[in-house]
Amino acid sequence: MLHLKGRVLVGPDDVRDELWVVGGRVTFDRPVMARDATTVTGWALPGLVDAHCHVGLDAHGPVDAPTSEKQALTDRDAGTLLIRDAGSPSDTRWVDDREDLPRIIRAGRHIARTKRYIRNYAHEIEPEDLVAYVAQEARRGDGWVKLVGDWIDRSTGDLAACWPRGAVEAAIAEAHRLGARVTAHCFAEDTLAPLVEAGIDCIEHATGLTEETIPLFAERGVAIVPTLVNIATFPRLADGGAAKFPRWADHMRRLHDRRYDTVRAAYDAGVPVFAGTDAGGSLAHGLVAEEVVELTRAGLPAVAALSATTWGARDWLGRPGLTEGAPADLVVYESDPRADVRVLAAPRRVVLRGRIVG
C-alpha cells in the first residue's frame, strides 16, 4: 500500500492533495489500514507517454531480448510508463508479462515501399500488396498500423511519396475495418494532403505541414507527433548526404529551420499534438522529458506540452490516467512541472503497477 501526499495532478486543473495505492490501483478513499502504507511526497503525474518509440530496434534493425529490455528500462526510469511503439521488427510481446516494464501499444512492423526506407526495418513491398500487409500488421498490433509515407527517391534526388493514392485509400479503409488506426512517417509537404483525405489518423514528424495543409489536419482531427528531438538531427543527416543528393539535403535543412514554426502553427490551429522521441533507431531511449522541453520551445504552453505526454496522450491512446480504480502508473517530482517542465528530467519516484520501481 502506498500513500502519496503533496499535489496529485489528475488533470491540468484537477489537483488533489493525496491518493492511495491499494492492490496496485489508485483510490482517493482512505483505506482501513492506512497507517501501514508507505508514504511518498511530491508532485505526481500520470506515467509519461512516449507516443513514438521503438523497443526492439536499433540503427541496424531488430535487436535481441536483453537489448530490448535495456531500452524499456531506460524509458521506464525516465518516467515513460506507456509507449506507443511506432514500428518494430522484433517480437516484444514478452514485455507484457513483465510487471517492471512499461506498457506497450504496438503498431506492428513498418510497411515501406521496396528500397525506400532504412534497411532491415520494414516490410518492403509494392502497392498491390499494401492492403494485405496492412491487414496483417493490424492483426499483429495493438490497434495501430505504421506506414512509411515518404522517403528519398533516388531517381529525383529528393523526398517523394511512396504510395499511389488509391492504394493508400484501400489500405486505410481495411485497417479501419479491422479496428486499427493508421499512422505514417512523413517529412515532405506533398505527401500529407492525400494521406489525410484518405482517412489517416496520425502523422509522425509532420515537418512538411504548411498553411495549406494545417487547416485540413485540424478539420479532420488528424494528430501529429513531431519528434522534435529527432528533427534536430536533420542538419547532420543533410551534411552526410549533400554530395550525392543536394536537393534532398537542402530540403531537409529547410524543414529543420522551420520546425518550431510548423509545430506552433499546427497547435494554434487546433491540431492535436503529442510527444514522441523516435527512440530506438539512431536515438537513445529515455528522452521524453527533452521532447516536452522542445515542444515548449516551439511555443506550446507548458500545460499543453505536459498534456502531450500525460493526460491528453493517455486519453488519445485509450489508457487511463490517475482516476479511481485505474492501474497505479505514476511519476513523482520535487516541484510543480506546470511551472517548469524541465523537472520531468529528474523523477523523484516512479511507480508502476502500484510498485515503486525507481
Image (tube, rainbow, N blue to C red):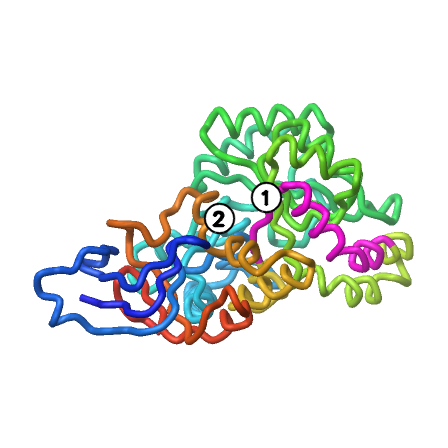
Which residue in the structure is indicated by mark 2?
A: 312
Q: Is residue 20 visible?
A: yes
Pinpoint residue 89: horizontal percent, then vertical percent.
Answer: 52, 51
Toward which corner of the image does residue 255 lie, by quadrant? bottom right
Q: Amino acid type of disc 2?
A: Gly
User: Which residues are drawn in magenta?
Assistant: 251-276
Q: Is residue 111 visible?
A: no
Residue at coordinates 48% horizontally, 54% vertically from top-left? Answer: 90
Q: In the current view of this chain or complex, which residue is farthest to the left? A: 32
| Vertical arrangement, residue 276 with respect to residue 348, above or below | above
Q: Is residue 357 left or right of residue 153?
A: left
Q: Nearer the viewer, residue 19 or 237?
A: 19
Q: Quadrant of the C terminus?
A: bottom left
Pinpoint residue 210: horizontal percent, then vertical percent.
Answer: 78, 42
Q: Quadrant of the N terminus?
A: bottom left
Q: Nearer the viewer, residue 132 or 40?
A: 40
Residue at coordinates 41% horizontally, 42% vertically from top-left? Answer: 318
> Does the CB distance between marks 1 and 2 fall below 8 Å?
yes
